[in-house]
Structure formats: C-alpha cells, structure tokens
C-alpha cells in the first residue's frame, strides 16, 4: 500500500536557515570590498520575507548595487528553500573606504614640491575673468571708436567730453573722487587676490601616488564619511562632524554605555578613518562626547584626547 505524499509528513524550513541562505546569497552579489552586516527572515506558510543589511565600498552606485543584491537574494533564497519570496529588503547601513595605495617615494622635484604632491590645485575663477574681459573689451572698444572718429574729422563723443569736463572740475580733495579711488583700490585688491591665491578652501589636498598627479577631497564628503564611522560605534546615537584644513571636530551623543569607553572607541575608529582618507596633511582630531537621554536632552560633556595630524 502506497501512502500519499501529503500524508508522509511535512518539511519546515526554519527562519534561521532562511536568514543564513539570504545572507549568503546577498554576499554573492556584493561588489568588491562589500560585506553583509546582518540579516533577518520571517516564514509564514510557504512564503518568506527577508531583509539584509550590507556595507558597500565607497564610491559605488548604491541603488544599482542594492538592486543586484535584492534580485540575487530573492532568486537564490526561493530556489534553495522552495519558498516564495514576495518581498526582499536591502538596507545600506554603512560605507567603507578602502585604504589608499602606498605612496612611493618621489624623486626630488623643484622647490615647493614637497612629498611629491605637486603644486596645489587652483580655482579657475571663470566668472571674474569673464567679467573683467568683457568690461575691458567694451571700454577699449568705445575709446578706440571715438579716437578713430576724431581722427577722421568727427566730433568727440559726448561721454568723453563729459568725463574730461568732470575731471577738470573735481580734484583729489572731493569726496566723490576719494570714494571712487577707494572702490578702485578694493576692486584691484580683489582681482589681485583672485590671481595670486589658489582658492578652493573647501577642498582638502590628498596625497598623490606621483608628482604629476593632483587630487583633492571635499570637506563635506570627508565629514560625511567620518560621521558614518562615528555612528557605527556602539553607544553613539548621533554625531556632528566638521572638517577643516587643520582640525576635525566631532560631537557625539551617547545613548548607552560608559561615555569614557565610547569616547575612546570613537577616537580609535576615527583616527584610523582619517588615515584611510589619504590626505596629505591629516587634520588634528578633537572629539566631544555628551550623554543623551531618552528625550534627546544632553547633560554632561567630555572632551576626548586630541590626535595631532602629521604634516
């Protein structure tokens, strides 16, 4: 006598097994440098819902990477468990920055070329250059047309005679002449600053693998990376980071744990992250930790040790 298949027993796939399969399937679709942080699964009847948190390398297109991971997790989990997966959720919980390649020793260059990093990147300043060129060309063109007209027997332009008459009637002691001189001096000083100063104050100079290569990192991007690293420290519930050329300030809110231990871990993690940014001059790190209660209020403040940046 043959027993029907429905009466022989049942096969149950535990949520823990589904979670492990989903994590392994997501790891197969991760780009180089990515990792799976955590996963979860819920099984109801013949269907399962899975969620996977991943860490992606920076820079990467997060939307395209998450789409590939979601499709891979859905298809592999359904194929290996026999369950339908109507919904799969992929969360990008963190970004990881790969360590910069070792910088080879550069040959001695010209004066001012230290550490083989080449000269600083200078701002192009296209708008001031275009405005100055248009104003100069217009003034020179009007004057040239008037001079040519006078040479061929024409009368001088009214604007030129008016300017000459006004200048003859006003001397250096007049207020209008002084104000015009001060304005011209300020404009000249501004143009000299545009020509001589490199600008781009919001970019941090990076170490280059060769003297002919120049690279810079925006201070906002550096602050975002450090903030993500700070929020990954256990106990830190919020963080504010500001990065300047010589100093990086971090204000972290501690929701649980001992503030001293959390502060030490934040200093350690961010100190390593600062080196991973590949900057030519590592800014000095200052960490301030505050205890945050459930209502979001802050009580104590504890300053962390400073990490002096290398020149």
Image: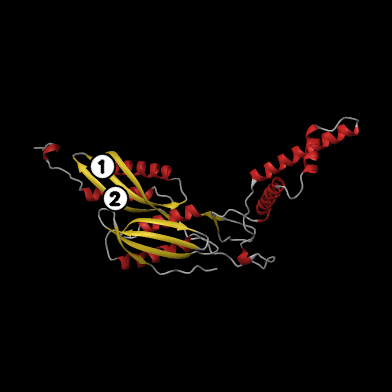
Which residue is identified by label 2? 39
Residue placed at 61% from the left, 62% from the top? 117
Q: Secondary structure at mark 2?
A: strand
Q: Count how many numbered circles sit on residues in the image.
A: 2
Residue placed at 78% from the left, 42% from the top? 169
Q: Is residue 240 above or below residue 70?
A: below
Q: Is residue 235 above or below residue 8?
A: below
Q: Are marks 2 and 1 in contact (CB under 8 Å)?
A: no
Which residue is situated farthest in the left direction here? Answer: 1
Where's residue 231, x and y in %? 36, 56
Q: Is residue 100 left or right of residue 231?
A: right
Report which quarter residue 131 is drawn in.
top right
The answer to whether any part of residue 32 appears in the image is no
Which residue is identified by label 1? 49
Where's residue 273, x and y in %? 44, 61
The image quadrant where one finds the C terminus is: bottom right
Q: Residues within 10 Å of mark 1 (few under 14, many from 20)?
A: many
């Amino acid at each position: 006598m043959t027993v029907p298949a429905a009466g022989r027993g049942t096969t149950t796939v535990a949520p823990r097994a589904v979670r492990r399969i989903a994590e392994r399937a997501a790891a197969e679709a991760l780009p180089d440098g990515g990792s799976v942080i955590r996963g979860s699964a819920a099984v109801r009847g013949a269907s399962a819902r899975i969620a996977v948190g991943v860490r992606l390398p920076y820079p990467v297109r997060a939307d395209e990477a998450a789409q590939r991971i979601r499709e891979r997790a859905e298809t592999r989990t359904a194929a290996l468990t026999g369950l339908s997966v109507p919904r799969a959720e992929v969360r990008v919980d963190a970004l990881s920055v790969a360590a910069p390649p070792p910088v080879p020793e550069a040959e001695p260059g010209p004066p001012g070329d230290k550490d083989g990093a080449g000269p600083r990147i200078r701002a192009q300043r296209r708008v001031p250059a275009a405005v100055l060129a248009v104003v100069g060309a217009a003034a020179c063109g009007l004057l040239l047309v008037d001079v040519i007209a006078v040479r061929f027997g024409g009368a001088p332009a009214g604007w030129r005679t008016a300017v000459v008459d006004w200048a003859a009637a006003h001397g250096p002691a007049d207020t209008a002449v002084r104000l015009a001189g001060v304005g011209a001096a300020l404009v000249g000083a501004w143009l000299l600053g545009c020509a001589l100063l490199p600008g781009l104050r919001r970019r941090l100079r990076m170490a280059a693998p060769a003297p002919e290569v120049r690279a810079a990192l925006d201070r906002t991007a550096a602050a975002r990376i450090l903030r993500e690293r700070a929020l990954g420290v256990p106990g830190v519930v919020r963080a504010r980071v500001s990065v300047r050329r010589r100093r990086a300030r971090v204000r972290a809110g501690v929701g649980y744990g001992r503030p001293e231990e959390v502060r030490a871990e934040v200093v350690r993690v961010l100190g390593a992250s600062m080196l991973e940014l590949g900057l030519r001059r590592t800014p000095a790190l200052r960490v301030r930790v505050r205890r945050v209660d459930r209502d979001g209020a802050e009580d104590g403040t504890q300053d962390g040790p400073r990490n002096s940046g290398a020149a």
